[in-house]
Amino acid sequence: MYKITIGLEIHTQLLTNSKMFSGSKNEVSNMPNININEIDLGMPGTMPSVNEQAVKLAVRLAKILDMEIDPVLRFDRKNYFYQDLPKGYQITQQFYPIGKNGKIIVNNKNVHIERIHLEEDTAKQIHEGKEILLDYNRAGIPLIEIVTKPEIHNKEECIGFLTELKRILTFFEISDGKMENASLRVDLNISISDTGKLGTKVEIKNINSFSAVTKAIDYEYDRQSKLLSKKLNIEQETRKWDESSQTTITMRKKTGLIEYRYMTEPNILPVDIHKLIENEVIDSKKDPQQIKSMLVSNSLNENIINQLLDDYQLFKIFMCANKKVNDFNLTTTWIIIELIKILNDEQKKIESVSQEIVNNIIEMMMMIKSNQINGKQAKTLIEQIYKTKQNPKTLISKLGFEQITDKKNIRSLLIKIINDNIEMVNQNKDRRERVEKFILGLLMKETKGQANPNIAKTLLDDLLNNK
């Protein structure tokens, strides 16, 4: 039986308005090469300028991960040639990372983080036949690279770590953590051995989903195990996960250490960030663990809690609604269950839900709470609110859902129903609750659910008391 050892290198794009070293907009657009300038393209004579917000976000993450923070900000050049690197080098932090020696607790075990450092992203490559197209919108977007120690020993631990990290990044608004948009990318360093020592490291690059991470670990363990069982050597190489074949495939062999000719970045002088470190205060209310405890204390089940913690946008909508409605069960029903069902049916994401729609759903929930509409009507309403963006009052009028509140009208309907079912009423005098449920059910059927239930209940109690 071979023991697997996994180390992680994670790149996450930061939530800044502009790029790491230029004033270009930090936005990956559908239109290629529009958010670029001469700095992003590495034009001669251009000078980089450090994005202060990116530094603040790096300090925030370092504090959350309980890291040692370097009070002097310094950058280096990593020299190599590749199509997506316009300058011929990447500005990074090889020698003096902004944060060292942190940790995340996963299932009561510390997974140690060796370092985090700031750097810039590369351009995006688009392969079309034999051609490679380059989109420089991504070039220069600020990144934090997070490097763990090689001490993860199974896929569950790996996913547990990545889940906790993604929650930290999103809830503290450091990154949007969207793996499908490549704003969170995972490299796996995997080795297996039965000697108690680390085996030969194989790197799996740029994995963009937790599902692919799990499959890549399983595949590599199986592949490397078969090689060792046949007394064959495992080659040190860089591979990638191929979704179509569900395998890892070779990108390049590593015949020795790659010489990146690191050097101090001459165009960025060291910056004293003592003050910035002092001023970056962590808001504990955003801590996913504290939020989890709050949700547990309000009796939400584990699946709902994980759904909220794994989707920050959904969590924000949920809490916005519950702040007004003040009923976790009601909010869960109409935001987590019914709204998400509509989105799934429409193949839309939570980001497609505007604040206007959220406000209209909140108004609808308040109407449910005050018994102005019933659950059946609300199901129709929420669908129409999403499709038409109209407010509930307008929709109620259009759909003929207005409640009957006229006491005289409701009383006469109740008297008729009681008289039509007098035998049942008389036979169940000692089972008052059953009679009330039966009569009110018939009333709702007669009025298509439009009789106000509170008024109806009060009037029925009075009629039965005087019977």
Image (tube, rainbow, N blue to C red):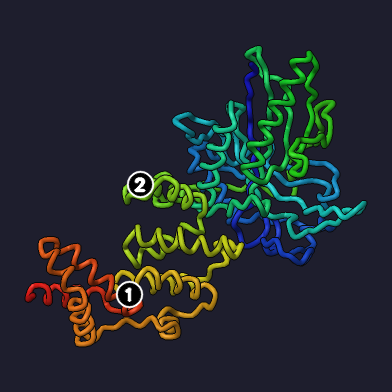
Which of the labelled discs sits on residue 27, or is there none?
none
Q: Can residue 74 be seen in this view?
A: no
Residue pictured at 32% horizontal, 81% vertical: 403
Q: Position of residue 401 (x, y in %)?
A: 38, 80
- Upstream in the sequence, badge 2 or badge 1? 2
Q: Where is residue 189 in the image (x, y as percent from the top left)?
A: 68, 31
The quadrant in which residue 139 appears is bottom right
Task: Say which of 254 and 467 sits in front.
Answer: 467
Task: Give the labeled residue for mark 1.
Answer: 445
Residue pictured at 78% horizontal, 33% vertical: 238
Please state which of the two labelled residues, at mark 2 or mark 1, is closer to the viewer: 1
The amino acid type of the residue labelled 1 equals Lys
Q: Quadrant of the N terminus?
A: top right
Secondary structure beneath label 1: helix
Q: Position of residue 195 (x, y in %)?
A: 66, 12
Does 381 sit above or below residue 112? below
Residue pictured at 50% horizontal, 75% vertical: 384
Q: Quadrant of the C terminus?
A: bottom left
The amino acid type of the residue labelled 2 equals Val
Left or right: where 311 falls relative to 246: left
Task: Say which of 26 and 403 sits in front.
Answer: 403
Q: Crowding at label 2, few (<14), some or many (≥20) Cα neighbours within 10 Å? A: some
Q: Where is residue 286 in the image (x, y as percent from the top left)?
A: 43, 51
Which of the labelled discs sits on residue 296, or is there none?
2
Residue pictured at 55% horizontal, 46% vertical: 166
